Amino acid sequence: MRERAMKFGTKAIHAGVEADPATGAIMTPIYQTSTYAQTAPGVHKGYEYSRTHNPTRTALQNALAALENGKHGLCFSSGMASIDAIVKLLKPGDEVVSTNDLYGGTYRLFTKVYAEFGIVFRFVDMGDMANVSAAINDKTKLIWAETPTNPLLKIIDIAALAALAEKHKCLLGVDNTFASPFLQNPMDLGADIVMHSVTKYLGGHSDVVMGALVVKDDALHERLAFIQNSCGAIPGPQDCFLVLRGLKTLHLRMQRHSENGKVIAEWLVKHPKVDKVYWPGFPSHPNHVVAKKQMRDFGGMMSFTLKGDDMADATKFLSTTKVFTLAESLGGVESLSGHPASMTHASIPREERLKNGLADTLIRLSVGLEDAEDLIEDLEQALG
Ligand code: P1T
């Protein structure tokens, strides 16, 4: 199939997937096998051992590569395992310039695991490219950006970062988890590596933990595939099947996430008890122009604070919603609420969080696919 020429919805349904050569099955079978018969030593059908290759995983990797307009996909056992593989491209003494607003687990991996191995991480506000330029030196090997950022929904100009990465001959990796490939394709803007916590919008149903990388460059793919196989943090075929199934509705889900997100953000901002609302779709959002330039829509993630900034009020709200479930994670069909300071971002020291604008009282919403009227009614009663 001519995957590159297809539109997004057609790709979401068909990319990477071919009728099973053995039976004609339309859906890629779950190849629940660890190994493959060889007719003589080294004579096989391209599959030797499932840590290295598995047909269900291959179909998913190809689908993700097509959805991100890349060439190669690589799946990992979690989003963190996929970021871990990227850091393993580096060696002691190398430096990374990263967004200062980012998933707490990524911050933890950088500062608590890899800093110990002599890799230096510099966290900057990437809203101003001058901050990025100032942090780059001849040891910088990787620029790491999340956009939209978790949890403050800042938008980073990917094309501007790509220009800096090219000038300084370092890699640009973009965590595209919050946007999904439906809303944004960092590779088209010059990123070298696109990363996803597949756990979120790609899986879409809160039933799988998985990560993925997409690249274009053959040598970079070869090195990352070597790391994937050597370190072994691969997902099993059942999970790959579930994500292949989830992808088939990615475009429909993202449209509805974005529609519901807009309704909820615009409702929240008018509510007398709500103080700040962080959502890139507002013309008043500091990076709205960049968001409009590089995203197709604004998605269903947002954060907000309550007037008075009182922790007891935030706790009460989070404990009172009935349709929104208080839980870690995001991007599933069901709406979730979260408290970054004590949940997803607890591993970032409090002073760091406050310095970067992440208030103790911040509430994060992952707006799902329910009827917007029911979501608003739920928020209304919880705020009341
Ligand atoms: O959970 P895992 O699949 O390992 O993915 C890690 C990860 C990476 N990048 C971003 C932007 C993420 O949001 C996450 C995981 N985040 C949550 C669990 C959360 O609730 O924010």
Image (spheres, rainbow, N blue to C red):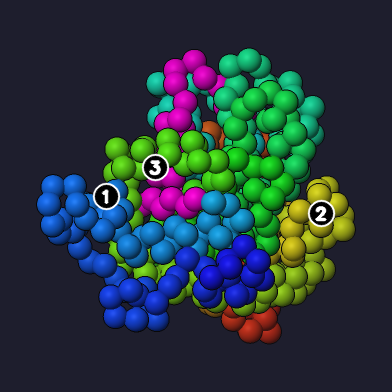
The residue mark sitting in front, 1 or 2, is: 1
Amino acid, disc 1: Arg
**Quadrant for the N terminus in the image:** bottom right
Q: Residue beneath label 3, please?
A: 225
Q: Earlier in the sequence, mark 1 or mark 3?
A: 1
Mark 1, residue position? 51
Q: The C terminus lies in which quarter of the figure?
A: bottom right
Residue lying at the far left of the rendered structure: 40
Where disc 1 sits, the SS reads loop
Task: Give the residue type that dot 3 points to.
Answer: Ala
Mark 1 crowdedness (10 Å alpha carbons): few <14, some 14-19, many ≥20: some
* Residue with the mark numbered 2: 293
Neighbour class for label 2 at 10 Å: few (<14), some, many (≥20)?
A: few
SS for dot 2? helix
State how many labels appear.
3
Q: Residue at x 87, y 58 (%)?
A: 283
Around disc 3, counting alpha carbons within 10 Å, would you say few (fewer than 14), some (14 to 19), or many (20 or more)?
Answer: some
Q: What's the magenta region?
A: 72-97
Cβ at disc 3 under 8 Å from ligand 1: no
Residue pictured at 34% horizontal, 75% vertical: 20
**Left or right of residue 310, residue 81 in this image:** left
Mark 2 or mark 3: whose residue is earlier in sequence:
3
**Mark closer to the chain start, 1 or 2:** 1
Side (left or right) of 187 relative to 273: left
Q: Is residue 12 visible?
A: yes
Any magenta on residue 372? no
Residue type beneath disc 2 = Lys
With respect to residue 72, does 115 lie above or below? above
On the image, the x and y values in percent for residue 22 come to 28, 75
Q: Is residue 200 visible?
A: no
